[in-house]
Image (tube, rainbow, N blue to C red):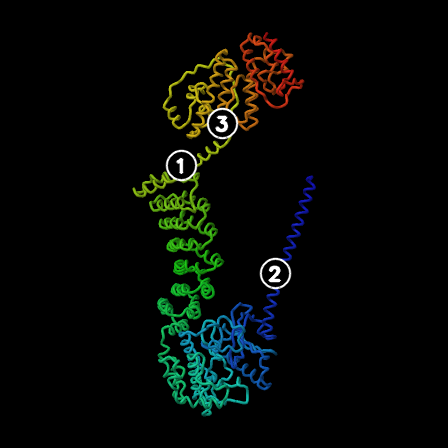
Amino acid sequence: MSQKEFKATAQDYLQKAGNVSKEYLNLFKNKLATTVVDTVYMAESITKNVIPGNPVTREYEVTKHVGSAGPGLLWKLYSGFKKSTRQEATVFVLHKKSLEVFSKKDRDLIVEAFRKGATQLARIKHPRILSLQHQLEESKDSLAFATEPCFSSLANALGNHENMPSPLPDDFKDFKLLEVETKYGLLQLAEALSFLHKDAKILHRNICPESIIINSNGAWKLAGFEFFVTNNNDPNDALKFPFKEWDGSVAAVLNPTLEYLAPEYGLSSECDCSSDMFSFGMLFYSVYNNGKTLYSCSNNYSAFVKNVEELKSLTNSQMSSIPSDIREYLKMLMHLNSELRPDAGQVTKIPFFDDVAVKTLEYLDSSFQVDNLQKSMFFKSLPQIIDKLPQRVCLQRIIPCLEQEFINPDMIPFILPSIFLIAEQSSTEEYVKYILPRLKTIFKIQKPIQILLIVLKNMSLILSKTPPTDIKEHILPLVCRSLETDTVEIQELCLATLPTFAHLLDSNSIKHQIIPRIRKLCLESSTLSVRVNSLICIGKILEHLEKWVVLDDVLPILEKITVRDSAVLMAMLGIYKIVLSHPKLGITKDLLATRVIPFLVPICIDNNLNMKQFNAYMTLVKEMMSQVESEQKKKLEQIEALEREKSIIPYSIAGSGSSKPKEVIKSPDTMMDQLMAGYGVTTASQQSANPPPSFHGESLVKSRSGNMPKKELTLSEKQELAARLEREEPKISSSMSLNSIKPANSITDNLMDKNLKDLSFSGNQKPTPLNSNYDLLTHSMTNTSLGNNQASRQSNLNSSFNSFSSPFSQMRPQSNQNLGFFGNLALPAPSSNSPQMNSVPNNSFNMHPNLATMNNSINSIPLIPGPPKFGSSMITKPNNQTVNNSQKSALDDLADIFG
């Protein structure tokens, strides 16, 4: 493929990849847009289905149905939020379609009554009365208004689930009011009635569980003003309210609930504030009797009048479910004589409500009226009370009240201990729902510094319950700010508490955000204690770091520390010791040898170290040296083992043309020679004084190459070698006797000695006696046990041939140089009765000693399988042996030259 074609192909591929990427991107955009549109459409459809066409839908988003309230529980409660501010709210909705069971007249009266109650609710402002966020809005299909976030009505909490969602929400499964919730809720209602009667001069006329709303914080709020009446007299005169009889001609939901209605509605034609107090007493009884009233009227006025007569004598069995310390007061509230009933203000002072938990909740609700000194004293003692309160009360009642004090930073240090105590007792789900959203605002406050100190002390608790995303987004910046602050106390506290929650932080956060700030404190802080605590902090979090982080980011910090105080040095020692010994970490041999040990050795002799500290440093250095030694030994042993496993490659045969060995003047060994010899290193003088031994003076074991290290033989190897030497000794002696008649320093002698030494390398193969250099050459070509490297065998062959043929090349005429004697010769070995070889007269070679040697060489040429390399014709011999004619001619020519 040409360059242009390749370029065009690459461009096409990139274009297709870009088109595919765009296609997937468009699909993703379309999917995202569809999801968003569907979500918005579903939310809008839910809102429109709940309150179709109502103006409340313009400002509020409805999410789910949570409860019901009001007369006949016709108001449906929906949780939601304001679209503009995302503020939580509850939307009350009356569906006009649900009124179809009533007559046209009753439907109109119900709508009018509900409109009246919602309108009156918007006019009254009091902490104990349900507060509105959006006034009543009416449409063709519904009435709707928005209030503070609510849980449900008291009727729902007591088990009346009419007009509730199906299936029932999980919050109502096994739900039961707690003692402190009941006590404080009744006290709140008494305060609401006191406000209505004395300040607003309003008679409620329908105090019952359907008219009481429990908000999301667990507070009881008064609502349900559908049947209220106001004072007719002059404000300066006594209160007088108009009397309205119970009307049986209309639907029951248009009248007050008979079970809670005061007896004067049946016995006389007047009513006053005590009528509401009777209803309050009946509500009190119902709450403590699991939602059951003292008697049942079933919307029958005649039954109501009959039951009222029984109030004259209340038996103890009827009051058995009521706490003993409130029974007498409750009988007074339900007395037939209205003058004997205590008013709302008197009810709030009953000893029954003098409970520590109730008083605590009451104080928290009114704490905004108290100065900071009194608040601080109260908040200091609050943790002791929290232990006695139920967890639900702490989460729903105390935490919201404490949150209101966050606008006053001076109070936050007194509030935080109580918050963290509640958090410790909470589950993770409760912590995330009720506590963490409030703590996020505290994490950003830096003054007073006590806030940061308290948060750092409780960091382990915070991190154990906080989701990872919030840890990275809110808590990690807090820790970083603590390390960067100028206050030494905060720095030391952060360094002391950081190891306790380091396992909860991810390694990347520690590497990129925590370690750099600790490094800065180690190297730049002017306070010795901060430096020491920084090093101690590093030592404690080492086990939570990866090995490469420690080697790359932590150890370089220690090398840059210039302070040599004993506390700093011992902290550094601890870090090195942990890194060296911890199974997860460890320091490499190269790093120990090149950086760590050279850095630690000068510290060992620092004058700031005492004897104990010096010994500790020396112990560590020795341990490091021992590790370097053991690892290096192991490495070298592995290298030697690999070398021994490799096949042995024979060295090239190098003949020497000298006729007499050189005389070597041996110089005496110096101390340096002896020292180097002790370490296994041979000096130049020792090498010249000790030339390589000949074959006759050394054993086969010592005839290996001089550069190879000695191998310690096992017992079995020694036995095998001894047996092989016994088999070879007769042949070696015969060879030596033949060589003894040859002229000294001949080429053949030198080569024989050389090659016999090399042959001692052959493994278990029995060596073949060699009678000539040609035998040696053919042996080196055929004996594969000498090595598997073809190049090495070819080099040995060439070297042997050149050393042998060099004396004859000068005597050979130029015309016969093309008949090289050994060239690429490959002849079959002659048999003992070969006529061609025996036809040569023995005395024809007596004129020169080398020719006699050549005669022996020719007679001992071994058979080498393979075709001949010369192009001449072949002579067939017996036993399938062949002799080349040109070879025979070459031998005859040589005989003529020397004859």
Q: CA distance from mark 1 to mark 3?
A: 38 Å
Report crowding for label 1: few under 14, some 14 to 19, many 20 or more residues within 10 A (C-alpha): some
Distance of label 1 from label 2 (alpha carbons): 63 Å
Q: Given the image, on which type of amino acid does mark 3 rest?
A: Asn
Quick one: label 2 or label 3, which is nearer the N terminus? 2
Q: What amino acid type should be assigned to the residue bearing mark 2? A: Leu
**Element at badge 1?**
helix
Could you classify mark 3 by the number of other residues whose Cα lies within 10 Å: few (under 14), some (14-19), or many (20 or more)? few
Q: Judge the density around disc 2: few (<14), some (14-19), many (≥20) Cα neighbours within 10 Å.
A: few
Q: Does 54 sit left or right of 576 as displayed?
A: right
Residue 529 visible from this viewpoint: yes
> Are the two marked residues, 1 and 3, in contact with CB atoms closer than 8 angstroms?
no
Pick out the residue farthest to the left: 611
Q: Which mark is residue 629?
A: 1
Measured as percent of width and height from the top left, residue 678 is found at 38, 27
Residue that mark 2 sits on: 32
Quarter of the view holding residue 307:
bottom left
| Mark toward the start of the polypeptide (1 vs 2) | 2
- On the image, the x and y values in percent for residue 654 come to 52, 20
The C terminus is located in which quarter?
Answer: top right
Label 3 belongs to which residue?
Answer: 764
Question: Is 799 placed left or right of 521 in the picture?
Answer: right
Residue 244 place in picture, x, y as percent: 50, 89
Q: Mark 2 and mark 3: span between their CA atoms?
A: 80 Å
The quadrant the N terminus occupies is top right
**Residue closest to the eye, 118 or 330:** 330
Q: Amino acid at mark 1?
A: Glu
Front-lying residue, 889 or 824: 889
- Which mark's residue is nearer the viewer, 1 or 3? 3
**Residue 336 disc label:** none
Give SS at disc 3. loop
